[in-house]
Amino acid sequence: MKIDWKPGTMIYPLPAVMISCGSEPSDYNIITASWVGTLCTNPPMCYASIRPERHSHAIISRTREFVINLTTVPLAYSTDWCGVKSGRDCNKFEAMGLTPGKASALLAPTITEAPLSIECRVRDIIPLGSHDMFMADVVNIQADDSYLDEQTGAFSMEEANLLAYSHGKYFSLGEMIGKFGWTVKKS
């Protein structure tokens, strides 16, 4: 039997990402977020929803760019820490020993330790209530070449040991059970 619950955000698991922003080292910041996702394939677009009171919100609103850095199990401590501490009070890159990398298409830094960094340029900011959604064009992706399949050039999500978030908890991803279309593939 199912029971009714109040409306809420129960779409889990989600990626646990660190969003880096800023236009120069003195204002670089990292915010941990899970309210991120794909909006469109062609053109490639994604979004990040951030509360207006968060320090990164003002930075991204001003610069109109950010980088979504996928996180890994070894980055779990830094991911959580960057989500509960404010960049108003500390330099998160220094505090967590993370390296600001040079983005190819933006002034915002990447996080060198992340296996994949998605460079985003804000197209629109949509106030939604508790969060504002930053709709963005994906202008470049930097991938750690140690996770690229030598034969296909594909990025190996399995090898990267990515981190997921589900209702207040972090998880590693489990074993693959199939790939898109496996249910109808002819032998």
Image (cartoon, grey):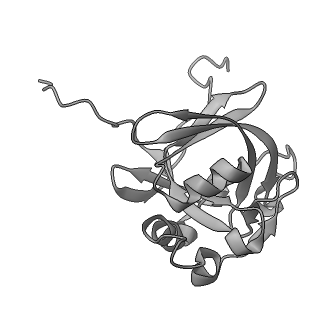
What is the tally of numbered marks visible in this picture?
A: 0
Q: Is residue 19 above or below residue 95?
A: above
Q: Is residue 129 above or below residue 70?
A: above
Which quadrant is the C terminus positioned in?
top right
Of 144 and 26, nearer the camera is 26
Of 119 and 91, nearer the camera is 91
Q: Position of residue 130 (x, y in %)?
A: 39, 42
In the image, taking residue 101 as reference, residue 60 lies left or right, namely left
The image quadrant of residue 1 is top left
Of 135 and 6, nearer the camera is 135
What residue do we see at 79% from left, 63% from top? 146
Q: Is residue 18 visible?
A: no
Q: Position of residue 173 (x, y in %)?
A: 50, 52
Q: Position of residue 105 (x, y in %)?
A: 87, 51
The image quadrant of residue 27 is bottom right
What residue do we see at 45% from left, 55% from top? 53
In the image, taking residue 1 as reference, residue 74 lies left or right, namely right
In the image, taking residue 157 as reference, residue 108 lies left or right, namely right
In the image, taking residue 145 as reference, residue 116 lies left or right, namely left
Q: Is residue 139 visible?
A: yes
The image quadrant of residue 44 is top right
What residue do we see at 63% from left, 82% from top? 94
What residue do we see at 34% from left, 37% from top? 9
Q: Position of residue 20 (x, y in %)?
A: 66, 60
